Amino acid sequence: MEELESSKAWYVLQTYSGYENKVKQNLESRAQSMKMEDNILQVLIPEEEKTTEKDGKAKTEMEKTFPGYVLVEMIMSDEAWYIVRNTPGVTGFVGSHGAGSKPSPLLPDEVDQILRSMGINPRKVEMDLEIGERIQITDGAFAGMEGNVTALETEKGKIKASIEMFGRETTAELDYNQISKID
């Protein structure tokens, strides 16, 4: 299973403009009906919240960041590739050179940036932590320091830890990927 986990990646699909929601719906139902939920994991339409004012009233609506494009997180296999590219409304993959070549996935930094702009935490890391547990900070401003977990914010992918700095207790908010457990 570990090998499969590392081969999952995000790809960009081109669609007919205005058909993004339909493509998302089609792709999700096809993945389910063809038993490909283990390969076709998530389908997202990059959107941002935009607030406009009309007649003195603020109106908030979701606006597509990249009209005509849909993101799909998948484990690339011949079957998954075939199902996705033959979904109604999909005109192709971005990063495919044609002639039957598989597309290139987005870089992790690109995916993180898009997901963050949508208000989604890109790095949900599964770590079995408990409040009071001792951790080592491996990255960021507090790298090399140790602390005790004071709060878990799993939806945000963050923890709060109490660390000693300059002889005083300080709380630091850290991403799961900035820490490791001390056994």
Image (spheres, rainbow, N blue to C red):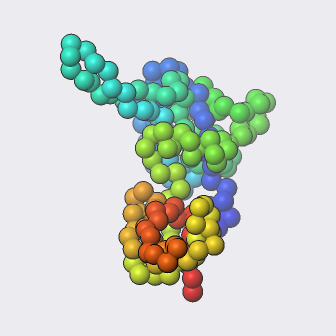
Between 182 and 170, the residue placed more toward the observer is 170
From this viewpoint, is residue 141 visible? yes
Task: Quarter of the image for the C terminus: give it.
Answer: bottom right
Q: Position of residue 153 (x, y in %)?
A: 39, 63
Q: Position of residue 47 (x, y in %)?
A: 44, 33
Compared to 53, does 147 lie above or below? below
Compared to 59, does 171 lie above or below? below
View extreme (left): residue: 56
Q: Residue at x 40, y 68 (%)?
A: 152
Q: Residue at x 51, y 43 (%)?
A: 115
Q: Position of residue 120 (x, y in %)?
A: 45, 47
From this viewpoint, is residue 33 visible? no
- Residue 57 sits in which quadrant? top left
Query: How many numbered discs sit on the rendered protein?
Result: 0
Between 134 and 29, the residue placed more toward the observer is 134
View extreme (front): residue: 166
Q: Residue at x 58, y 66 (%)?
A: 142
Q: Residue at x 41, y 81 (%)?
A: 132
Task: Quarter of the image for the N terminus: give it.
Answer: bottom right
Compared to 167, does 86 lie above or below? above
Q: Position of residue 136 (x, y in %)?
A: 58, 76
Between 3 and 141, the residue placed more toward the observer is 141
View extreme (top): residue: 55
Between 14 and 172, the residue placed more toward the observer is 172
Q: Is residue 127 left or right of residue 10?
A: left
Q: Is residue 93 left or right of residue 19?
A: right
